[in-house]
Amino acid sequence: MNVTTENEITATAAFDVMRYRADFPILGRHVHITSKSPGRQLVYLDNGATTQKPQQVIDAITHYYSHYNANIHRGVHALSQEASAAYEAARETVAHFVNAASAQEIIFTRGTTESVNLVAHAWLRSRLNAGDEVLITAMEHHSNIVPWQLVCEEKGATLKVVPVNDNGELDYEAAAALLTSRTKLFAFTHVSNTLGTVNDVQRLTAMAHAQHIPVLVDGAQAAPHLRINVQELGCDFYCFSAHKTYGPTGIGMLYVRGELMREMQPYQGGGGIISHVTFEKTTFVEGPLRFEAGTPNIEGAIGFAAALDYMNAVGLPAITAHEHDLLTYTTAQLEQIEGMRIIGTAPCKAGVISFVVGNLHPYDVGTILDQQGVAVRTGHHCTQPLMQRFGVPGTVRVSFGLYNTRSDADQFITALHKALKMLA
Ligand code: PLP
C-alpha cells in the first residue's frame, strides 16, 4: 500500500505551507529568551506528542465561552439549546471526518486512552473468560496494551502479540496464525507513533473478521496524517484524540460500528446517560450519550470540530503528500550521518522518524536540539516493549505536522550536526 498517489504529489506542489503557518500563532514564538538573548525561533517537530492549534480552533473555543456557554441537553433556555446544538453538530463533524454511517456511532471520550479503556470495560470485559485471548501487536502504544492487560489479568485471559520485523513492519502471516477461536478482540494501531509504519488495516481487519473476531484500531497517529474511512477500513472500533489533529486536549472520539454500540454496557454511571432512575433500577438511553456520563467537555467538542473543519479545508490528501515530502527529504539527510540508525524503515510510513546515533543517549541529543530551538521527543514514546524489540532504551523522534517546512527540516539537521559535534 502506498499512501502517496500521483494526485497527492501534485497537491504538494500547490501546498501553501506559509499560508497555513500563519494560522498558528505559537509558531512565531522564540524559546529560551533571556535578558541577554532574544532566544531561538521555535522549530516544532513534536507533533506526534501533540499538535499546535490554529487560530480558528482558539477562536471557536473563545466564541463558545463569550457567547453561548451553558450546560447541554438538559436546559430549555436559549444558551443551553445553542450549546447542545453545537455539541451535537460537533459529533456530526467527527462522523463525517471518519465517514461513519451515522453520528450515533461516535462517542466523545477524553481521548484515545479513554476510548480504549471504554471498549475494554464496556464491551470486552463481560465477554472475556479464562483461556480467552486478546491479540495486539508489538508496536502498540501503552494505551493500547495496558487496558487489555488489566482485563486479561482480571479474567484469566492471555494477551498475545503479533511480532514486527527489523524494518518495523507487522508480520502478517504471524497475525493470521495468532487469530484463533480463542481470540475475542484484535486491537492494533493504524500508524505506529514510534516507527511511523502505516499498517494495512483493511487486510488485518479482513483476517480477523474471517474468524468473526472484532477489531479495534488505534488511530491516534493516523487521523492527523491520513484520510480515515471507517466503512472502507471495515473495523468495529476506531479512536483518536483531538489534540493530535490540531484540536484541544481532553477530548477524543470512539467510533463504534452500529450493532456493537447496542451490545455495550454503560461505562460510567451518572447524569446524562439515563432514561429513568429509581432507587431500585436505572434504565439508560440508547446511543453514544449512554457512554457520556456527567457534563461533557463541551468546549472540547466544539474545538475538536473546528480542528477537523480546518484539516478538511487544507485537505487530507494534500497534508499526506506534504508530510511525505518532509519525511523523504529529512530521511535522506539523516542517512548521510555516520552512526545513524533509523528505527522504522517500512516502505509505507507517515511523517515520523525515530533514530539513535552511535551510543549517544537520545536525551542528550534532544537537550542540545532544544537549546537550539528545535523541539523533538526523546525516550521510549510509551512503547517500551518496542524499544526492547529493537534493543534501544529510547530514540529521538521527529514528527511532522501540516505546518512544517523543509526549512524546519534543515534547521533540525543543522542543530543535530552541532549536537553530535558537542557530544563527540
Ligand atoms: N496511541 C498512540 C499510537 C499514540 O501515539 C498515543 C499518544 O501519543 C496514544 C495512543 C494515547 O493518546 P492520548 O494520550 O491522547 O490518549
Image (cartoon, rainbow, N blue to C red):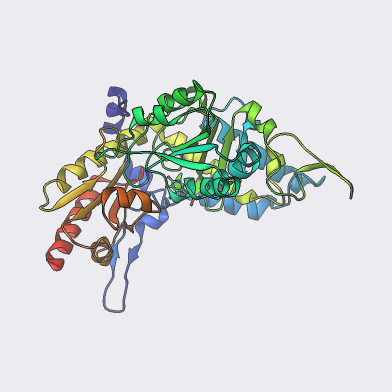
Residue 191 coordinates in the image, percent (x, y): 38, 38
Q: Is residue 157 left or right of residue 408?
A: right
Res. 379 image quadrant:
bottom left
> Is 167 above or below relative to 151?
above
Which one is nearer the viewer's eye here, 125 or 328?
125
**Position of the C terminus by quadrant:** bottom left
Q: How many marks?
A: 0
| Residue that lies at the very extreme toward the front in this rendered image | 131
Residue 338 coordinates in the image, percent (x, y): 10, 53
Can see residue 252?
no
Q: Residue at x 29, y 51 (%)?
A: 398
> Is 409 above or below relative to 33?
above
Q: Is residue 24 left or right of residue 354?
A: right
Q: Is residue 192 left or right of residue 287?
A: left
Res. 322 image quadrant:
top left
Residue 150 coordinates in the image, percent (x, y): 55, 50
Which one is nearer the viewer's eye here, 220 or 33?
220
Q: Residue at x 61, y 51 (%)?
A: 299
